[in-house]
Image: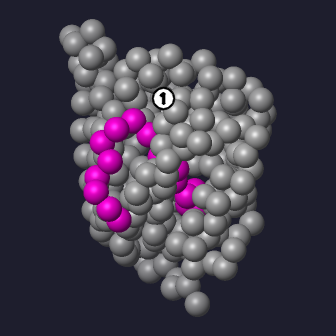
Amino acid sequence: MAREIRFIEYIRSIIGFILFVVLMTLVIPIIMVLLILTFGRSTNFIIRTFGPAIAHTVFAVFGIRFKKKYHGPKFDKPAIYLINHSSTLDILALMATGLDRIRFVVKWELQYFPFFFFIGRLTGQIFIKRQHSEKAIQTLVKAYDRIKKNGLSIMVAPEGSRKHEGIIGPFKKGAFRMAIDLGYPIVPLYYEGNKELSYAGSMLTKSGTITAHIHPPIDTSEWSLETIEDHIAETRALYLKWAGIQA
């Protein structure tokens, strides 16, 4: 049975959430100045530095320890990183991971939060309308030139939403279509602990440990649109196994 949240964790959650909002708001003018002074060339430095700093600070207030575990050699080439999406802690977890030259595919609605809108737009994140599959894919296709030109990696939650039945929801095609179109490998990234530490899917959090399991890349060079459904099923089966579920 899942442990109930303790009073101290209520307090930590409230303080941590306020701190997150304050930090995100404070970094906006700093990011704008850096981008102007460097003519936009500091974007990767900003994402690699500011994101983890904010996330680790907030995690410390929450009483959460964040760890990264590589299940093989570090992969430093452009790739499509897939993450499991099951918790409100996922945003902090992906920020804390601190991957180099990464851009995030995020839901359109996050732009309704001013700091996500400004930071996301300033740093070139990709906002998509996940309810409309074809429009989402069109948005991704439009970003291809920028992604290839700058040697960027992309992080995507193939489940689309954390609100789904079961621990691992159905996977959408977008990330797999990108891997085929760009000729990128897929790097599975499984977050362990996010769901268990997020209390009832809210911003209330329990103390504990989150581990980012970064697995070896999956070669997609022989993939095609005709076989994409098979590859989606094979990849999702890995996440089910890591979650301890029989496929």
In the image, is residue 116 part of the stretch drawn in magenta?
no
Q: Which residues are magenta?
A: 71-87
**Name of the residue lying farthest toward the bottom:** 1
Quadrant for the C terminus in the image: bottom right
Q: Is residue 42 above or below residue 79?
A: above
Q: Is residue 211 above or below residue 140?
A: below
Q: Amino acid at mark 1?
A: Gln
Question: On the rendered structure, is 172 left or right of 243?
Answer: right
- Majority secondary structure of magenta residues: loop
Residue 199 at x, y percent in the picture: 55, 70
Q: Is residue 78 visible?
A: yes
Residue 96 at x, y percent in the picture: 33, 51
Quarter assignment of residue 46: top left
Q: Nearer the viewer, residue 55 or 171?
A: 171
Question: On the rendered structure, is 38 left or right of 7?
Answer: left
Residue at 27% over, 17% down: 41
Question: On the rendered structure, is 56 left or right of 221?
Answer: left
Quadrant for the N terminus in the image: bottom right
Q: Nearer the viewer, residue 28 or 171?
A: 171
Q: Nearer the viewer, residue 219 or 9?
A: 219
Residue at 46% over, 63% down: 191
Residue at 52% over, 33% down: 183
Q: Which residue is mark 1?
A: 125
Residue at 40% over, 29% down: 152
Element class at badge 1:
loop
Quarter assignment of residue 40: top left
Q: Nearer the viewer, residue 140 or 121?
A: 140
Residue 54 at x, y percent in the picture: 30, 46
Quarter assignment of residue 175: top right
